[in-house]
Amino acid sequence: MSDNVKINVNGLQIESEPNKLLIEACEDSGIHIPRFCWHKRLDPVGMCRMCLVEIETPRGKMLVPSCTTEVSDEMVVDTESEIVKKAQEGVLEFLLINHPLDCPICDKAGECPLQDQTMAYGPGESRFVEEKRHFEKPIPISEIILLDRERCILCARCTRFSDEISGDPLIEFIQRGNKTEVNTFPNEPFKSYFSGNTVQICPVGALTSTSYRFKARPWDLKSTRSTCNGCSMGCSVELNSSQNKMLRILGVDNEHINQGWLCDRGRYNFEYLNSDQRIKVPLKKTESDREETTLQEVYSDLSKIIEDRSNKITFLLGSNLTNEEFTSFNEFSNKLGNHENSIYLNEDILFKGFFDENIENAKIEDLNKSDAIIIWAEDLKETLPVLYLRVRQAVKNGVKLVIFGHTNSTLADIADVYYSAETVSNNFEIVKDISKLKEIKEHIKDKNVTAILGKASPNQSDQSIEKLFTYLKDNANLKLLNAFNGGNSFGAFQTLGSIKGNREFSSEVSKETTDLLFVVGADPIGKSIFSSNIKNIINEIPTVIALDLFMHETSELADYIVPTSSTLGEKEGTFTNIEFRTSRIDKLIPSPGQALSDWEFISGLSNFCKFEGMSESLTDLNNKSFDSFDLDTKPTFDNLDKPRNLDGIINTSVPNITTTDESIEFSDSFFVGKKLYGDKVTERHSKSISLLGSSQFIEGNESTFEKYKLNSGKCILVQENIEITVSYKINPSLPDGLIFFPKNRRNMNKLDFSKNIQILPSHSMEVLNVN
């Protein structure tokens, strides 16, 4: 590694890594250089010229943009000379010529770089007296993003993010000269899963979000750092609230995980917290309807069932609980004397995974250090969207990418090798000898490989994915990320003794095996491929209690419903992500009505049942969750609050996932997966994104749909007495005969994919033209 270079900045001697940009070297040494276009996660372009500095050259002093100039040994730099100040004043004066005086009504006011730098570096007054240019204010460029072209200073942050980071170049410069503006293409809205990031990095408020527009000023906001639990990435976020209402979520630049980026579901799926439809009081089913009750009555009724030790008690837990809440249910289950595993996780795609002391668990940052990345899992863009961004970043930096079909087609454009129908069957089996696939051998043999492996669909067999894993382990220096994507599923793996999924629940649980069922933060009837079977089971169980935020298809069947706090902003705890990195979840706003945390409910029920030796506080549960870890690396609240651990602490574990190896019998023509937006109850009650997951559709290639004689854009799915009208979308990356069904869209849970599904043309009425 090269030695650091020494440079002189404003008379001060500082050191920097060689080839580093001057603006970064100064930033690292505490010397601020103003900027608009430069962002440390984007390629430098030197467009705004606000970062001009003077450097000494053999021909004398020269003004250069510090965001495109690399440091060199003995470089002499002046960031505060009169010439630099004059240049900064000139840049700001030109920017303000057409910039409107919107500060009193602009959402960016109070945290606006243009506002701040005008005060610090601007001329103090304007010589411009002519009419400013005007555009329509604002224009919606998507369902959640608004564009105010008058405010835009053409820094290209939004266009570069869309092109370089997300791979969705849907927003671009149009026109020329002084008519240049940022806009979308005609009839192509800014439909990116990552569009909210452009709002956060926009330096002037030209891009705003519908969820936050005109809601609050920065100085009115309370904020705390927390962790997103929308998927197993565990992105670092900042929560903002005002008057006890959540108003905004921002990405925090955690180098190890999300680097400041968020998907739009993680950013905007918070409005449900303020919904009037939240359950606020305990409810009890009566013969005719439901009536409000008290927690004491719920505890009393449940304790009578629990006191009879002949009664069998089962738990179906959602994956959005905190680690401490998983521990509380595990502790409670053990107190009941449940020697056999009675805890199920609300996950359809659950298999044993690749957890072993001989398997090195990868870190997300290992993607950039690898020679090659191998992916065979559910669509990362839909299920682990920020991991998708990190893969794109690694490929941009020169890492080779090999993908096994048919789910990650959104990465096919940057993949070095994409194995489709010739290699992978419609049932997700590798039909060729892997050792004879020349392309993969070139990229992995004796090289550093990071693999992202998981079932691409519920009907994929364990053996097919194990076949690829074995080959990689034998031929490469392998690190592995197990691609389980459900919320805090890795926290469940760490804290629960033994885990089963919805498949095992639907085959093992019945009224003979369960007298009391706890359904906690889970809606399997609404979202599982086993929903019809699970619905029949729950209907037959004598007593069911649901702990949840809203009424939904599963909680509606419960005998008791207890309102709970949301993991997003309403409770404290910890979260463990896909690399077993544990980080804090913090509370910012109060829970509505009588809602309480799940662990508080279990604690109260334990006291009512007079159980002894139970954890009595959240701190006790936190310590108990990580009893087996070393003291220095134990992710207790005290350790996580230390500055060096704000980005989380990694402790790998070998979970006990006890699932059956038998494959699910699906038709060769169908496979089931998830889309980023769906019909989840929290998304339905988040206004900004509620309609983004409302459309019902299937996907296939053109020749597949031609066989079904579809030509109207709509079709009808028929199974027994069920008929569902859906759109069909052309996906050219899917092989012939294979059709994708998004299981998290409305009504898809009514279908049984182990049985035949007819796809018929939709005969819509045509309007008769009598002219």
Image (spheres, rainbow, N blue to C red):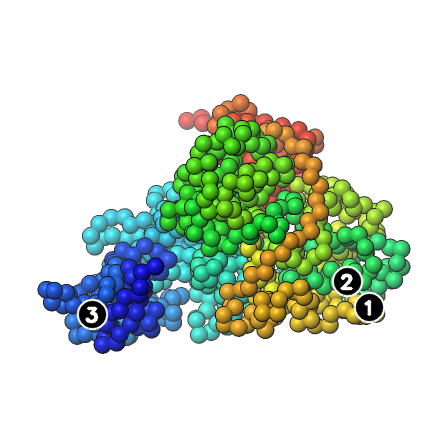
Q: How far apart are marks 1 and 3 (CA)?
A: 72 Å
The residue that disc 3 covers is 76
Q: Which amino acid does label 1 sit on?
A: Phe
Q: Is mark 3 on a helix, strand or loop?
A: strand
- Residue 134, x across and y down, in percent: 27, 58
Instruction: Indicate whether 306 appears above or below 190.
Output: below
Q: Could you say where residue 591 lies in the image, as x and y percent from the top left?
A: 63, 68
Cα distance in 3D space between marks 3 and 2: 67 Å
The residue that appears at 55% across and 24% down in the rendered structure is: 708
Cα distance between the residues tagged 2 and 1 = 9 Å
Residue 332: numbered disc: 2
Residue at the spot 70% in from the left edge and 57% down from the top edge: 496
* Res. 70 visible in picture: yes
Q: Mark 1 and mark 2 in contact (Cβ < 8 Å)?
A: yes
Residue under the image location 54 percent in, 40 percent down: 474
Q: Residue at x 78, y 66 (%)?
A: 605
- The residue beneath circle 1 is 611
For the residues labelled 1 and 3, say whether their Cβ atoms are less than 8 Å apart.
Answer: no
Q: What element carries label 1?
A: loop
First in residue order: circle 3 vs circle 2:
3
Q: Which of marks 3 and 2 is in front?
A: 3
